[in-house]
Image (cartoon, grey):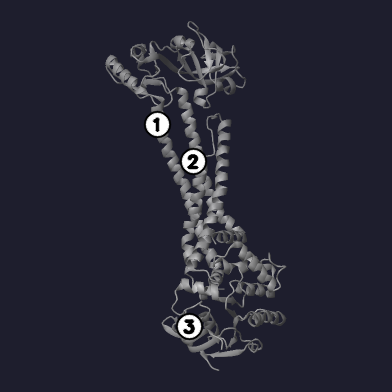
Amino acid sequence: MKNSVIRLEDVWKIYMLDETEVPAVRGIDVNIKEGEFVSIIGKSGSGKSTTLNLVGCLDNASRGRIFLDGKDISKLDEKELARVRGRKIGFVFQTFNLIPSLNAVDNVKLPMIFQGYSEEKMEARSQKLLEMVDLGHRLDHKPSSLSGGERQRVAIARALANDPEVILADEPTGNLDTKTGEQILKFLIKLNKEKGKTLIIVTHDMYVAKKADRVIKLQDGKVIN
Amino acid sequence: MIKDFFMYGLKNMRHRQLRSWLTILGVVVGIAAIVSLITIGEGLENAITDQFSALGADKIRVIPEGLTGPPAEVSGLTDDDVDTIEDVIGVDWVAGVTMNYATVEYDNLETIMFIKGYPEDLAEEGKIDIDLGLVDGSWYRNGDTNVAVIGDAVANSVFDEEIRVNNNLLIDDEKFRVIGILEALGDQGSDTVVYIPLDYARDKFEMGDEVNAIVVAIEEGEDITEIGDKIAKDLERRRDDDNFDMFTPDQLLDQLGSILGVVQFLLGGIAAISLLVGGIGIMNSMYTSVLERTKQIGVMKAVGASRFEIMFIFLIEAGLIGLVGGLIGVVMGNVFAFAVEGVAGLMGFGLLRITIEWDIVAFALVFAFVIGMISGVYPSWKAAKLKPVEALRWE
């Protein structure tokens, strides 16, 4: 039996709009095991991105507890959350979110800088990761001179920079054509199968969702399956 | 890590080229103004020091009371005063000097010039009121009458034709033969003087036994202040009044130095205001940059940057804008100062000597970097405070 890597216990996220409370996530319980590939689906406003943000330590829960690797992260402060994000989680976004002024290598280096690695190690590792996503010939290119698929591959390499246990992908194929999307999905699945990374993909594309070991369906901020 | 932050800052500056340069320009103007004004101020101070050292640190000057600034035809001192001072122990020699303006004509060109009557016997012995040698000819001797020793500018630049030894000048329509030419000092005042024998000058300008100034040389090893006090006391006793002023080059230099200090302070203040404007420019630019890069800040936070690190990144970038502005400003400031030196030289004020003041250069660079950082504090803090989720959602 594999260990639980992420566990959400009765987690709520409530936003305040003026004086009104707007709950985006209403008491969800989720348990994701190490090396599992899970997709989270749901309509717009179902709370899937909010859930991903909570798991990714990008936001604090209003109520409930979130465990990452057995450690309760719901009460961590800004600085500790930043450290956890840097070491344990790799993000892949729908809009790639690369830094336009930096070339591919420097974009991949970025997460390592905050961990204080040596220049040589960062350089070597970012090159290796870019080669792994078939971008060995595009090291010095800035995002503006890369195609959508190439940008998302740089983003995947960046997500792997600190060798995190968990990859969180928010609509990773949403901005790509079908063929490129397929290719990106293959890369991500490869990471899950071959490298044993826990992969959580938020999507509304059923084709993508069905590739996962398990599908978690959200509706109105609750898990419904 | 810090090196990476610097690289990141530089890459961002390059990425936002036009905006970066415009912001940098604001700092350049401020730093260039400060550097050039201070450098020129220092050059001016050196010039004044040089000029006064030519007056000789061992000489006291006595002038009638109320006579300050350029000499005028005011008197109140006579040969009796000269004799009184000669009797003071510790005094080496005393020169009573007359100063008059007269028309000087050469090669059919006329101009008003400053004519100094200087004792022939002292001139013959080489005891002159300023420490300037002759480039050509000799000083006049006892009994010489219509002869003149002229300053460098009189010889070389005042008239169209160069004046050489043995050429004749007309001073108030009277012929004088040039017998000596002085070295250049570098300023118009000293270089346009014409020395003629004192007795002859007194006759010519109907001065009687009056002198306009008395130059007192102190014996070597004597204390100039002590001798000065003695002279003042003896003069007061004999004249039964204190209608005279005394000064040494050092005193005058101190006075001028403090005036120059005030001027430099004011100019520095004006330059500082322009630097403040440059700083506000950096703040504005960094603030816009934070807004523009909100999403990037979100990304950096997502990949593990802490608040402190985000703040640091933006502070360094702001500091770099300041530093680059400072570097260019220092170069431009010095270029401007040297240009002023060149123009001053062409206009006859060759005494102004500009040298690169390395301490000011270092100060300006550190100052520019710090101004950049300070201007970056608020925008950086705004950036650091952003919540990662909100920053990532920014479009």
How far apart, in angstroms, are the residues tagged by discs 2 and 3? 62 Å
- Local crowd size for mark 3, using a 10 Å CA cut-off: few (<14), some (14–19), many (≥20): many
B7 to A146, vertically: above or below: above
Mark 3 residue element:
strand
Residue on which the image places disc 3: A66
**Label 2 environment density (alpha carbons within 10 Å; few <14, some 14–19, many ≥20):** many
**Between B77 and A220, the one nearer to me in the picture:** A220
Indicate the amino acid at tag 2.
Ile
In the image, B29 versus B387, the foreground residue is B387
Q: Quadrant for the N terminus of chain B, please.
A: bottom right
| Secondary structure found at label 1 | helix
Q: Please give the chain letter of the residue carrying mark 1.
A: B
Q: Mark 1 points at which residue?
A: B254
Q: Mark 2 points at which residue?
A: B38
Q: Can residue A61 be seen in this view?
A: yes
- Label 3 resides on the chain identified as A
